[in-house]
Image (cartoon, grey):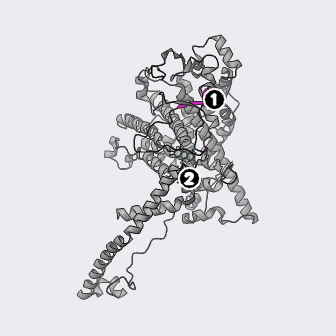
Amino acid sequence: SSPAVSLPQFKFSPFDSPDFCSQIITPTCNTTFSYIDDLNKNIRPSLAELVKTSYFKYFKVNLDKQCKFWNAQHFCATENCAVEILSPDQYNWTNVTNPDLKPSRLGKIERAGSTAADGSIETEEPDTCEDLDYSHIDDDHQCVYVNLLNNPERFTGYGGNQSFDVWKAIYSENCFPNTNPMSMISEEKEQCVEKNLFYRVVSGLHASIAVHLSNEYLNAETGEFYPNLKVFMERVGSFNDRLSNIYFNYALVAESLVKLAEVLPLREFIQSGYDDISPAQQQHLLENNAVDPQDKYDDLLLNKIIPSLGSNPLFNTSTLFDPKSVDPKLKDEFRARFKNTSAIMDCVGCDRCRMWGKIQIIGYGTALKILFESEDPNNADKLRFRRIELVALLNTFDRLSKSIAAINNFKELYLSHLEDVKKGLAQPGDYEKKHNDKGGFDFPFFSTPNIDTTEKEETSPKRKLPPQPKKTVNTKSTNKLYHIDAEKLKDASKRTIVDEFKIAVNEVWEAVRFVLLSYRDLPSNLYKMALIHLNNFWNMLIGRPGVYEYESNIKLDKENQAYQKLFSD
Ligand SMILES: Cc1cc2nc3c(=O)[nH]c(=O)nc-3n(C[C@H](O)[C@H](O)[C@H](O)COP(=O)(O)OP(=O)(O)OC[C@H]3O[C@@H](n4cnc5c(N)ncnc54)[C@H](O)[C@@H]3O)c2cc1C
């Protein structure tokens, strides 16, 4: 039965919009944001309940897989970045009744008679379904089971150059060669919507992770986690594009769930998790609270969540990867590159971050597979879904849903800060300080109701360039060999041949001086670089990932950038 929801009717078809690249969900589309806010409020309790059920809370993952792109270290000494792994006897699902029962990749339970000589669980290869997969799924003897509820996604301290490199590698996957034939004709087509889709998914994931880590930020003194408005504003709140990409991903995953319910008999699929179990065993599992009753899934997922999401179309994918307008190879390229991002996840140094990174990339991969492969008649026989994909999809949706709830909470915190400023209880500069370079603190996204677009455009927080040094010749500089009059410097017609000669000598001297000074500074620069690397190495050795970064990250980054510039110069 459909839930009683009354939501405003509107059609949100981002891809129909000509300015799709920049304007899917922006402050100019208030209804879109507020629609998703309302929708989320409506389904949040059911979704939060659903991810606590036995089907959705266990995740199978290989946390020891080596990074195949560079020599990345997996390290974890603090409990914040550690993952609590289930011992076999804790994993009730497989052991309550019969230790011979193991969950398979296809969501069915098989007899352990198929265990290979090396102790690994041999599972049937699911035909060719991997051809259509947008992510790698761990399924080897190194895999462990994790109860996601015991390992929340929150602040871990992971950061600095290590996480920066991972993000950089992930974003670089978006630089695929242009396969859009139209781009040969039209410049603007070069930024094809499919590439923007890739970018927005990654950016939305990145922003959502930042929301979670700022929403549950560690207070180093008390050891408690709390919502840190300042961190939120610095990483997400002041960037409308990042905020909108979270909403974008929400719409994308929600639409994929609605579509999945159309192409897959979800009830039977979830039920098949208990296949091969006799009615008596099933009863036994239920009595031991090892699994939740099917009624619960019916009620939460099929009766509440999916009908609410499906009450209005959220995402129109019909024009994407249209073979009439783009090279058919674009989809294969997109799929392969997105799949690569799931392999990059093995390069994340912190265990907890790696695990949630993998879950979410598999979740988005599953959403993309549903949206872009399920309607293709050529795929009718090949399309398969595994339990782990459904688990990842729902948990990814829960992450986004929790992000949106947290964003609204941060909005309240920010508005109450503004009230405090009005009453004189807080300093107006409390949050603005960091944002001076943006020309004052403004938060159009948060002041959504009935904003005038033109005004908003003008006041939106655009990053102002820091004052640039003026390109004038300093005639008083003692570094020059000859003094030249300012007038002559400005106006070439007033110069004599001797002046020209002196200017040329000054320029050569300046270049020679720069080279000589670089040599003079080299030992001290090398010493500083060695210190930075030793510091990195030491923190890694004692398992203090990222702690130093949070204290001196900005300083270190600046120094690193200065050195990089120095050497590239
Ligand atoms: C897969 C993965 C999972 C992680 N999980 C966690 C976790 O669970 N808990 C935790 O505490 N840390 C986690 N981290 C680390 C976290 O994402 C940050 O990298 C870290 O907190 C350092 O943040 P930063 O502000 O230095 O910039 P970063 O977040 O590392 O960003 C680097 C640069 O990317 C750009 N950027 C930032 N956000 C966006 C965006 N949304 N869209 C486009 N560009 C952007 C900015 O230019 C920024 O300077 C994870 C990292 C990775 C790679």
Classed neighbour count for the residue bearing mark 1: other residues with Cα under 10 Å, few (<14), some (14–19), many (≥20): some
For the C terminus, the quadrant is bottom left
- Residue extending farthest to the left is 497
Residue picked out by circle 1: 307
- Coordinates of residue 421 in the picture (x, y in percent): 72, 63
Cα distance between the residues tagged 1 and 2: 30 Å
- Coordinates of residue 160 in the picture (x, y in percent): 51, 53
Residue 460 appears in view: no
Query: Is residue 191 covered in magenta?
Result: no
Classed neighbour count for the residue bearing mark 2: other residues with Cα under 10 Å, few (<14), some (14–19), many (≥20): some
Tell me what residue is drawn at x 54 percent, y 38 percent: 355
Residue 55 appears in view: yes
The type of residue carrying mark 2 is Asn
- Per the image, label 1 sits on a secondary structure element best described as helix
Mark 1 or mark 2, earlier in chain: 2
Q: Quadrant of residue 287?
A: top right
The type of residue carrying mark 1 is Pro
Is residue 325 toward the left or the right of residue 403 in the image?
left
Is residue 73 toward the left or the right of residue 302 in the image?
left
Q: Give the vertical position of 228 relative to 373 (above or below).
A: below
Q: Give the vertical position of 541 relative to 43 (above or below).
A: below
Is residue 476 toward the left or the right of residue 225 in the image?
left
Query: Is residue 61 covered in magenta?
Result: yes
Q: Give the vertical position of 493 relative to 334 (above or below).
A: below
For the N terminus, the quadrant is top right
Looking at the rendering, the stretch of residues picked out in magenta corresponds to 54-79
- Please tell me which residue lies in front, 141 or 7: 141
- Per the image, label 2 sits on a secondary structure element best described as helix
- Please tell me which residue lies in front, 313 or 273: 273
Q: Which mark is residue 240?
A: 2
- Coordinates of residue 289 in the picture (x, y in percent): 69, 22
